[in-house]
Amino acid sequence: MIDRYAHFAAAISNINQYVQRIESQKMRAYGLGGSCAQYLVAVHTRGEGLTMSELGEICQKDKAAVSRTVAQLEEKALVERRNQGCALYRSKIYLTKEGEKAAGEVTSAACKAVELAGKGLTQAERETFYKALDLISGNLKTLLQNATEF
């Protein structure tokens, strides 16, 4: 069991590091850190705009992290908030023209990375992999929500 844990933890850690490096490479051109890439892709994918709360849920980030990142993206004129009489946190976030360009570059790189990462997998294997990944993630989330201590 310990060998399985070590293998699992190392593989997940390595994948995460590689994804972060890809994101950092793409965002460097905009003077931003790699974490901004997920936010751009999320807003780009959703087109109609997202609230800070929705963005945090999609990117699995807490309120403070979302606020910091959106502020950085606003400072670089990649996103804008449209308040429409709402509290700032409830206003929708949209990509600017420059943000659309950046999000397109990040999305293109992400698609290429996912395609190359899955090279050699059949469609059935890919579906099984993502199903297993979602199941593992959900199980660990449940474990942490229900456990008081390990």
Image: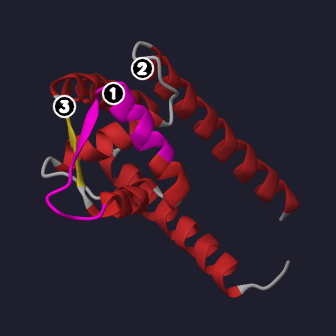
Q: Which residues are magenta?
A: 68-87
For badge 2, the amino acid type reads Lys
Q: Residue at x 25, y 28 (%)?
A: 99
Q: Residues within 10 Å of mark 3 (few under 14, many from 20)?
A: some
Label 2 sits on residue: 26
Rendered view: 8 above or below 72: below
Instruction: Point out the tag, 1 or 3, that comes first from the N-terminus.
Output: 3
Whole-percent x and y of residue 73? Answer: 37, 33
Rendered view: 37 above or below 129: above
Q: Secondary structure at mark 2?
A: helix
Q: Residues within 10 Å of mark 1 (few under 14, many from 20)?
A: many
Q: Secondary structure at mark 1?
A: helix
Rendered view: 90 above or below 41: below
Whether residue 121 appears in this view of the structure is: no
Label 3 sits on residue: 96
Magenta-span inclusion, residue 56: no
Q: Residues within 10 Å of mark 2 (few under 14, many from 20)?
A: many
Instruction: Point out the tag, 3 or 2, that comes first from the N-terminus.
Output: 2
Which label belongs to residue 106? 1
For badge 3, the amino acid type reads Thr
Asked if disc 2 and disc 1 are in contact, CB closer than 8 Å, the reply is yes
Q: Secondary structure at mark 3?
A: loop
Between residues 35 and 122, which one lies in front from this camera angle? 35
Q: What separation in Å lies between label 2 and label 1 (alpha carbons)?
A: 6 Å
